[in-house]
Amino acid sequence: MEPLPPAPHRLLINGEALVANWRWLRERGGSAACGACVKADGYGLGAVEVSRRLVAAGCRDLYVSSWAEAAALPVFPGVGLSVFHGVLPGEEAFAAAHRARPVLSTVDQVLRWRPTKQPCDVMVDTGMNRLGLSPEDVRQGVTDGLVIDTLMSHLVAADTDSPTSEHQRAEFAALAGRTTARRMSLANSAGILLGEAYAFDLTRPGLALYGGRPRAEARVRSVVALQARVVQRRAVSAGGTVGYNGLWRAERDTPVAIVNLGYADGFARAWTNRGVASGPAGERLPVVGRVSMDLTALDVTTSPAIGDGEWITFPVDLSAAARATERSQYEVLTGLGQRMERSFI
Ligand SMILES: *Cc1c(COP(=O)(O)O)cnc(C)c1O
C-alpha cells in the first residue's frame, strides 16, 4: 500500500504567540500567579500541546472541565490540575486517586469529598448562578475540614463595563480568611483586563491565551490560522458565476482557485463574498461566491503563480469572525478545523 498523502488542510497554531499571550496576561495580574484553562481540548487547539508549551513557560495551574479531560493530559511534575465540574456521584474513587483536584461546588460534593482527605478547590457563586456554593454556605463553615487549595468564583460579565463585576469582586474579597484555602482566584481573561484588583492570588485565563479579545484592552496576538490546499485553479469567463446559487459573477475573465476548506472546517458561510485569504507571498485573495461544506473559491488575479496543490492561509481574527458570524469568539475558536491536524509553529 502506498502511504496516505498528507491532509489537504491543517490548523496552524503559533506556539510563540500563545506563550507571549500567557506572559502578557500574567503581567496584567501583577504578583498573582497565572494559570491556563485548557478545557474543551485547549479551546480546540489541542490541550496536550498547549499545556506543554505553557508549562514550559512557567504556568503551574491548569484547568479542565471533566475527569475525562484531566485523564487525557500527561503528568506535568509540579503543576496543579483542577476539574471545574467537581465530583459527580460515583466519581469520588477515581477523583481521589487522581492527581487532579475537583472544584467542589455543592454541599453534597463537600460531604462526599471530605472523607477522602484529598486536596480540592471550592467554587463559590457570587452571581453567576451556574456552579458554586453560596457565600453564606462558606460563612457558615460548610467547607470546614476540607483541604482547600484555591477558593474561586467566576465573573458574570467581565467582558462589559457592568457594575456586577465590582459587586462580585467585593463579595468574593469578603470571604478572605473564612476558609483554609491557600489561594483565591476570580479572574478569567476578561476579569484580568479589569485590573489587578481582580487578580487575587491566581488568574484563570482561557480565551485571551488563544488570541481572543474579550475587551478592548486585550493586547494579545492572534494564535490560529486555517491552511488549506488549492484543489483546482480555473479560469472563469466574464459573466460566469461561482458556487451555489451563483452569488458571485465575474465582471471580467477571472482566475479562481478552489480551496479545500469550507464551513465544516469552521470557515463560516458568513464569509461568502467577503472573507479574505492570504497567498504564498502574502497576497490578498478575496473569497468569491458561497462558502460550501468543503470548498471555498478565491479570486487569485493577483497571484499568477498559485496552482493546484498550493497552500493558502486563512488568518483567523477571532473578534472579527465573531462579529461577522454573530457568534461568540469562544464558538468560533472551538469550531475551527475539527477534522484537521493541529500543526504548531
Ligand atoms: C472557562 C473558564 C475560565 C476561562 O474563561 P475565559 O473567558 O475563556 O478566559 C475561567 N474560569 C472558569 C470557572 C471557567 O469555566
Image (tube, rainbow, N blue to C red):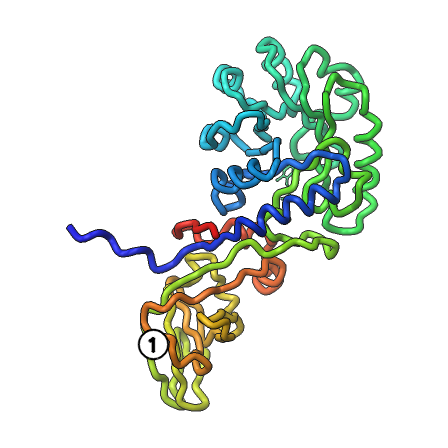
Q: Amino acid at mark 1?
A: Arg
**Nearest the eye: 314 or 322:** 314
**Nearest the eye: 51 or 267:** 51
Q: Is mark 1 within 8 Å of ligand 1?
A: no
Q: Name which quarter of the figure residue 150 lies in.
A: top right
31 over 275 or under it: above or below: above
Q: Which residue is mark 1?
A: 233
* Label 1 Cα crowd, 10 Å radius (few <14 / some 14-19 / many 20+): many
Q: Position of residue 168 (x, y in %)?
A: 79, 36
Q: Position of residue 194 (x, y in %)?
A: 78, 46
Q: Residue at position x 84%, y 34% from top?
A: 170
Which residue is the extreme one toward the left?
1
Q: Name which quarter of the figure residue 175 lies in.
A: top right
Q: Name which quarter of the figure residue 118 lies in.
A: top right
110 over 272 or under it: above or below: above
Q: Position of residue 182 (x, y in %)?
A: 72, 21
Q: Residue at position x 57%, y 11% from top?
A: 116
- Taking the image as shown, residue 153 lies to the left or right of residue 231, namely right
Labels in figure, total? 1
**Nearest the eye: 300 or 281:** 281
**Nearest the eye: 224 or 138:** 224
Q: Residue at position x 65%, y 41% from top?
A: 205
Q: Position of residue 233 (x, y in %)?
A: 34, 76
Q: Secondary structure at mark 1?
A: strand
